[in-house]
Amino acid sequence: MFDTVVVGGGLAGCLAAITLAQRNRKVLLLEAKTYPHHKVCGEFLSPESMPLFAAAGFLPTLQTLHPVSVRTARITAPDGTAWRTTFPAPGTGISRYALDAALATYTASLGVQVCDGIRVTRISGDLAGGFELTATTPQGTQIFHAKTVIAAHGKHSNLDRALKRIFGRTPQPYLGLKRHFTGNSLHDHLDLHVFPGGYCGMSDVEGDQTNVCLLVRQDVFQQASGDAGIEQFIAWMGRQNPYLQTWLAQVTPVEDRWISI
């Protein structure tokens, strides 16, 4: 039996597992996807997050990923208004594709048993008697036992439905999209471009790429995308903000499609 099973191998799950391992706990971390993988995320670590990575001992490893130091930000409006600021300390641009995989490897180096490609489908038990976790693996169903469980698996998963969590029954009015581009680097700068029904964030990550991640109301997306889908929406979005339109006209996508949540 493990002291703790952590469900979810993202930033929260790995840092929780690291904290427990530093206290000599026997920890198992289960991640549903295989590393590395892309995630819908702004891929910007704000300055106040750095002490968390420092406490985990991860900062030297993070620097080997060649992250981008982000020092300034701009918020723009559809009418061309722009507001600029300088951060009190630099933020960090790094893709989740690189960050999560490196953090999971580092977590394993501290003695945590890290297993990816394993999806937890059921959790039962209590603190008095311990917990049983049922998981789907490439080899079939597997059972794990632990004194405690940390659920760091994200939101609105099948596991939330199995646990009958109320928030999972409420339809979400927003859609998130993300993709990487090349051709018009922002360097040490971050942009947030507002458009009717949403906003689009941009910041550079490693490898001379710029991450574009946006949030939009579902009804606005459906109306703007019509029958043509995401690319028609992106063209519409660009027309709503002059800064967006100019930037999007100068870049080339890295991946063959947008990912969404």
Image: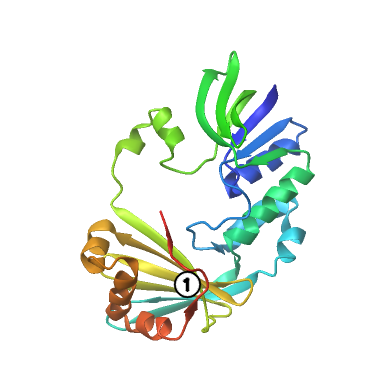
Q: Is residue 19 above or below residue 93?
A: above
**Residue under the image location 65 percent in, 51 percent down:** 52
**Quadrant into which the N terminus falls:** top right
In the displayed structure image, the side of residue 155 where residue 170 appears, left or right: left
Q: Is residue 234 left or right of residue 204?
A: left
SS label for mark 1: strand
User: Residue 142: percent from the left, percent from the top?
Assistant: 61, 27
Residue 44, given in percent of the width and then of the height, sits at 55, 64
- Name the outermost residue toward the top: 129
Question: Which image quadrant is residue 51 in?
Answer: bottom right
- Pointer 1 residue: 202
Tell how many labels: 1
Which picture quadrant has residue 100? bottom right
Estimate the x, y position of residue 128 in percent, counting from the top left.
58, 14
Q: Is 76 on the left or on the right of 119, as rendered?
A: left
Please state which amino acid type lies under the numbered disc 1.
Answer: Met
Residue drawn at x 38%, y 31% is 165
92 and 43: which is toward the camera = 43
Q: Residue at x 47, y 67 (%)?
A: 179
On the image, the x and y values in percent for residue 80 come to 31, 84
How packed mark 1 is, by other alpha carbons closer than 10 Å (few <14, some 14-19, many 20 or more), is many
- Give the residue at x 58% y 78%: 188
- Depth check: give the residue in front, 172 or 90: 172
Tell me: residue 222, above or below residue 247: above
Scheme by which the image is coloured: rainbow
Quarter-of-image position of residue 193: bottom left
Q: Is residue 24 above or below residue 251?
A: above
Foreground residue among 119 and 171: 119
